[in-house]
Image (spheres, helix red, strand yellow):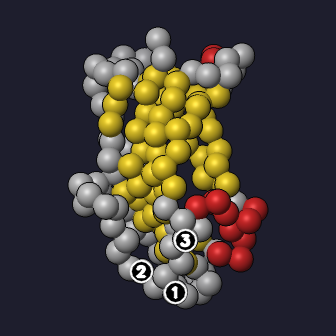
Amino acid sequence: RTEKKADTLEAEYNETFTFNFDPAATEERDIKFELWDHDTIGDNDKIGEVKLSLREFLNNREKKTITFKGTDKQQDKDDVGQGVVEVFLEPIGDGEFAEVKPPEDDGIEIKEELPGDESAKTAEVTHPVAEQKE
């Protein structure tokens, strides 16, 4: 989860997330990006989401423009916002952690080891940037 950005439709996050995954299951795995509207009063609204296959990013730093498909109240819309994400997945070693930094080390990092998963690998997702359409 990225930090909240107030009063902008062109938020830039530049955050890094490190997590464990099983490389044997990479071909069947997706990474899901969700676009939310944060409300000070009332419930937050999920505006859209997009799923990308992890396989295309394995050992390949890729920068992509993604289009969020509407969900919930926006489910009839195919384009509720766009964003640019830079994704790089790098297997490190069995159950080990290693820091994998983005080119500009200006993000945050989250680490969590999955208990009992000796085949886990470490990966990162860098620089999610989302832009919401009005």
Residue ID at (51%, 55%) = 62
Front disc: 2 or 3: 3
Residue type at tag 1: Gly
Distance CA(mark 3)–CA(mark 1) = 14 Å
Looking at the image, is mark 3 or mark 1 earlier in the sequence?
A: 3
Residue ID at (38%, 79%) = 98
10 Å crowding of disc 2: few (<14), some (14-19), many (20+): some
- Residue at the outermost top position: 134
Q: Which residue is mark 1?
A: 93
The one of 85 and 40 positioned closer to us in this rendering: 85
Distance CA(mark 2)–CA(mark 1) = 8 Å
Secondary structure at badge 2 equals loop
Q: Is residue 27 above or below residue 83?
A: below
Secondary structure at badge 3 equals loop
| Residue 72 x %, y % | 65, 23
Residue type at tag 2: Phe
Q: Which mark is residue 97?
A: 2
Q: Which mark is residue 59?
A: 3
Looking at the image, is mark 2 or mark 3 earlier in the sequence?
A: 3
